Amino acid sequence: MTREQVAALLAYAVRLDPRSAPTDQAAAGETLDSWADLLSDVPPTAPHPNGQHWDAAQVVRHHIATSPYPIKPSDVSRPWWDFHRDVIDRHHDPVPAVDPDDAAAYRAALAAGRHAVATGAAPAATFRELTGGTREERDQAAAERLAALGDYVPRTVRDALAPYRPRQAERERLAIEGLPDALDVPCPYDQCRAAVGAPCVNYRRIPRRDAHPTRLDRATARHYAPQEPAA
């Protein structure tokens, strides 16, 4: 919030609870300074993907209505950071509208989107927003991905084998849940260049546990790219 927005919030708090009114001009200035400092990174309003939007004025109102203690700036900042963590946990990066082969622009677009969500300037993009098609179409796509990974085995057998083939088990999980699989695309990282289906390697050519971020970005862009309609 800007200093002017904090001053308006303080005036609202004093109107609801006159006990919080400063005793003189000097005290008013000190109060505004401390509130403006603590709330400088707290927005007055922010969207929530579930509709439980943030409103600093409502936080002030709730505190005054439910607490016998005078309101402090931390009574506003702490709920904001709880709200902030919840929104960030729900956010899944949408595919930026830039060329995924332009790594710098792609990372910059992702960072800008995350910053906008973190500061309340933009709503979080949930997984549901990223997933297209009907349930039947997604199930069919999952079945096709599983078929491409190898011969079908019963779920009970697959689950029993999972500890002994963790990479295959993870790819099957991603296919079933309709999530991007980094191993569906070659790795663009110059020191790796792993082929489709092969794990990424480190500088010693030893297989890595996780794919390189640029490979995952490319797989995500491909996975969520609009599909051409069938002729």
Image (tube, helix red, strand yellow):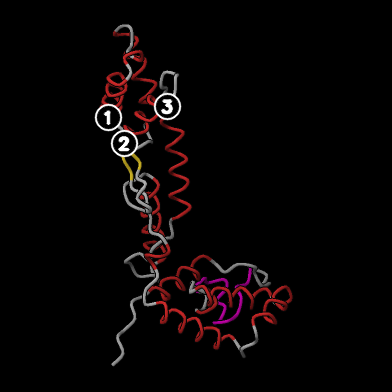
Which element is circle 2 on? loop
Task: List x then y, in percent, for residue 75.
Answer: 44, 28
Disc nearer the start of the sequence (2/1):
1
Q: Which residue is mark 3?
A: 66
Q: Which residues are magenta?
A: 188-202
Would you say residue 195 sits in the magenta stretch?
yes
* Quadrant placement of the N terminus: top left
State whether residue 46 is above or below residue 41: below
Q: In this view, which residue lies farthest toward the top? A: 24
Determine crowd level at label 1: few under 14, some 14-19, many 20+ residues with C-alpha closer than 10 A: some
Could you say whether the residue bearing mark 3 is in a helix, strand or loop? helix
155 magenta-colored: no
Tag nearer the camera, 2 or 3: 3
- Name the residue: 63% across, 72% down: 201
Q: Are marks 2 and 3 in contact (CB under 8 Å)?
A: no
In depth, the one of 20 and 167 nearer the eye is 20
Q: Are marks 2 and 1 in contact (CB under 8 Å)?
A: yes
Q: Along the horizontal axis of the image, is 33 left or right of 145?
A: left
How crowded is the residue under tag 3: few (<14 C-alpha within 10 Å), some, or many (20+)?
Answer: few
Task: Quickly name the residue at label 1.
Answer: 5
The amino acid on which the numbered mark 2 sits, given as a three-letter code, is Pro
Q: Quadrant of residue 90?
A: bottom left
Query: On the picture, is 165 further left or further right than 88?
Result: right
Q: Please name the residue shown 68% across and 73% down the image.
A: 166
> Quadrant of the image for the C terminus?
bottom left
Q: Which residue is mark 2?
A: 44
Q: Specify which label sits upstream in the sequence, 2 or 3.
A: 2
Foreground residue, 227 or 203?
227
Q: CA distance from mark 2 to mark 3?
A: 21 Å
Distance between mark 1 and mark 3 Cα atoms: 23 Å
Residue 214 position, x and y percent, is: 48, 67
